[in-house]
Image (cartoon, rainbow, N blue to C red):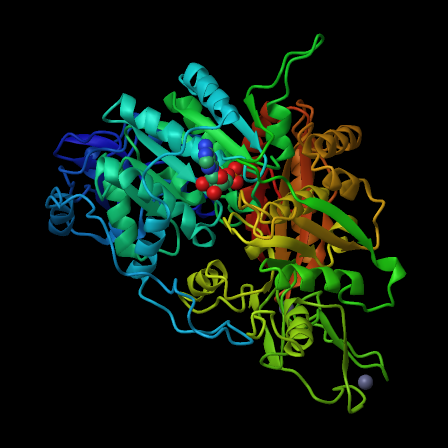
Amino acid sequence: MGIFSVLVDAPAHSGLTGALDYTSDKALQPGQLVRVPLGAREVMGVVWDGSPSTELDPAALRAAHWVCEDLPALNGAWRQLVQFAAQYYQRSPGEVALQALPPSLRRLQTEQLQRRLKPPKAKPVAKPKTKAHAKADGASPAPQDVAGAAGTPEDARLDARLEAWPASMPEPTPQQAEVLATLARSGAGGRTHLLFGATGSGKTEVYLRRMQAVLEADAQAQALIMVPEINLTPQLEARVRGRFEPLYGPGCVVSMHSAMTPAQRLKAWLAAHLGRARIVLGTRLAVFASMPGLRLIVVDEEHDPSYKQQDGARYSARDLAVYRGHLEGAEVILGSATPSLESWFQSRPATAHEPGGRYVRLVMPSRVGHSVQPDIRCVDMRLMPKGTLFAPLLLDAMRARMDGGEQVMVLLNRRGWAPVLLCTECDWKSACPQCSAYRVFHREDRTLRCHHCGLTHQAPKRCPSCDHEALSWQGRGTEQLHGFLAEWLAQGRHPSGRPYGVMRLDADSTRLKGSLERQLAQVHAGEVDVLVGTQMIAKGHDFQRFGMVVVADPDGALFSVDFRAPERLFALLLQAAGRAGRSAQGPGGRRAEVWVQTRQPGHPLFAALRQHDYPGFAAQQLQERELAGLPPFMHQALVRAEARQLEEALAFLTEAREQGLQMAGAPVTLYPAVPMTMQKVANAERAQMLVESPSRAALQQFLTAWSDALHEVRGRHRRLLRWAIDIDPQLI
Ligand code: ADP
Ligand code: ZN
Ligand code: ZN
């Protein structure tokens, strides 16, 4: 009989920070899964490294219940990744380890698990598909508003897309070939590369080629490809499957994301863990996938904020991917047309005076084929009457594009009809009673909805304060733009004789399962002339017929308190521009255009945007950041606290800070606690406190030392609702 350390799921706050000791009459290996008693419950645990204290009396310990011996142990690299993530993000290793496993794995009994471990019955390799087109004929008359047509079965849609992406490979363009050659030379040994490639320059093609080279070189090799939001890019999944299933069989690609059912997630996880799947395609949670043969990690759109987990262990999947590559000697490719300033800085070339960054920068400036980057222009909205939704000149240009058979995209990053409903007689505004925010007016279902806490009411017809019989609104959302365009276009007909198709695509229109896929299929099929939407429409889609992109009202982000807001805006606008003119032929034969409506046409951000000049924009931002002492020149952590009373949240943070200030030494600054900009959400008052240091190591050292004090102080502030620590926070 031996004593073993076992990790169980216990959040750092609960006081159980390390592994617990159990006995077992079998010899357990680190990384094996066991079931152990914890209080009155039985939970799953992972046998962990490190020998328990020799003074322990086995008789005083409880026994680990069973082991599924057929399930291979989680390997050393995986355990190190978990250990690192827990330490870096200030959580317990048990929480990180168990959260990284599929939830249903924890509930399975031995026999059920053994059944799932059996090798799958051999299936014939993908047979050529001939039928089962999704709605590709486009024969149905396009209704005025095409948002709600009936769907087709999931399989048929996927099949149709597979046909659109044949397994055959295009010849690499010269710039792709050069990048691939560099990767072949320097990829081994866990190096990180930043692939800075314009939208449409063929980055995805580079990922696929590189994956294939790595998988071909070693029959055990596995590749991980991460994407921000998988449901926004069903095309990519089809493209990966279309490329690799004919080569390695139907089970060679598995997906991992939170929208999958528990059973699907378990199946995918086991396939990766057992080495049966060669490729894992997933969102941020896939960074923890157990992949014994991992040789390559791709992080597509590496700048995307969704790689940062926003609760629990607030890890950055991109940063962990880089660490994991280093740990396992696996090649890492971070790809983007607008890299995060952190990655851009890390990939800086060496100069005469200074060594370069740790990443290798690879550049693909031009688009594939004859398609060129769209022309970007600003429309000065200061010259328009107040409240103008679209400049008349812009409407003319839109109409011309549509009549020429092209599609137009209108981007506005705000849902609903208007961000605030108000009374012109008195001062009433649709404030949320639970948050320091206004409730948004949704005209479609006549509701007032708070986008922060979710509180929803029927919108009043009369002023709730003075009973005035008419209310008005301020500002605009996607509903309003859609409504305006639908009304405007209803007065005319497309030259081909049909009515114009106007569609809105945002989180509201896609709430029902399957509706996003349905809407996208309609866009691809050409049933839509103008597509209005939030950032959902700007990301990743390989649209072929958009000749014009309109950015309706981007100015808010220019004045945000968050220093990363300009970076995010630039990325969004360039990504939106990337949806235009992707087809090499160009649908109307004219150069695609992006029109930005702004009251700040002289802003340097727009100047850089017009030139498609990310490096120029980045250089200017980095200079500002360096002067202001902000990331990537500074490393930050935020401690956040919520309570019913603001004073209670502030008191906790202030006491925590006092404790921290007594820990002398490292160059670490602790700023006084302040209320958050969005001070109240769902009746919780929120405050935060910034901790920073120019040295990442010093910050880490301080946080580790401070951690016990934080938990102890928290114990004295019982009225606190929640607190959390966010390392490398993305939202200030
Ligand atoms: P990115 O990921 O950089 O936006 P993609 O890889 O999606 O670019 O490529 C843009 C378009 O060009 C796609 O339609 C793709 O099929 C096509 N493409 C990519 N590489 C090649 C190539 N070497 N030859 C021909 N077409 C290509
Ligand atoms: Zn009123
Ligand atoms: Zn609210």
Res 126 visible: yes
Q: In which quarter of the image is residue 287?
A: top left
**From the viewer's perspective, is 238 left or right of 423?**
left
Q: Which quadrant would the N terminus be assigned to in this image?
A: top left
Q: Horizontal and vertical percent for residue 545?
A: 55, 54
**From the viewer's perspective, is 380 left or right of 414?**
right
The residue drawn where x is 40% and y is 37% is 225
**From the viewer's perspective, is 256 left or right of 416?**
left
Q: Which of 539 and 544 is in front in this view?
A: 544
Of all residues, the one furthest to the front in this rendering is: 496
The number of numbered badges drawn on the structure is 0
Q: Which of 303 and 653 is in front in this view?
A: 303
Rendered view: 702 above or below 638: above
Q: Horizontal and vertical percent for residue 348?
A: 64, 21
Figure quarter occupied by ligand 2 = bottom right
Res 51 visible: no
**From the viewer's perspective, is 56 left or right of 364?**
left
Q: Horizontal and vertical percent for residue 428?
A: 79, 79
The residue drawn where x is 81% and y is 40% is 604
Q: Which of 143 and 705 is in front in this view?
A: 143
Rendered view: 74 above or below 536: above
Of all residues, the one furthest to the top in this rendering is: 352
Q: Horizontal and vertical percent for residue 217?
A: 28, 21
Q: Quadrant of residue 634?
A: top right
Q: Which of 570 and 316 is in front in this view?
A: 570
Q: Quadrant of residue 72?
A: top left
Rendered view: 505 above or below 125: below
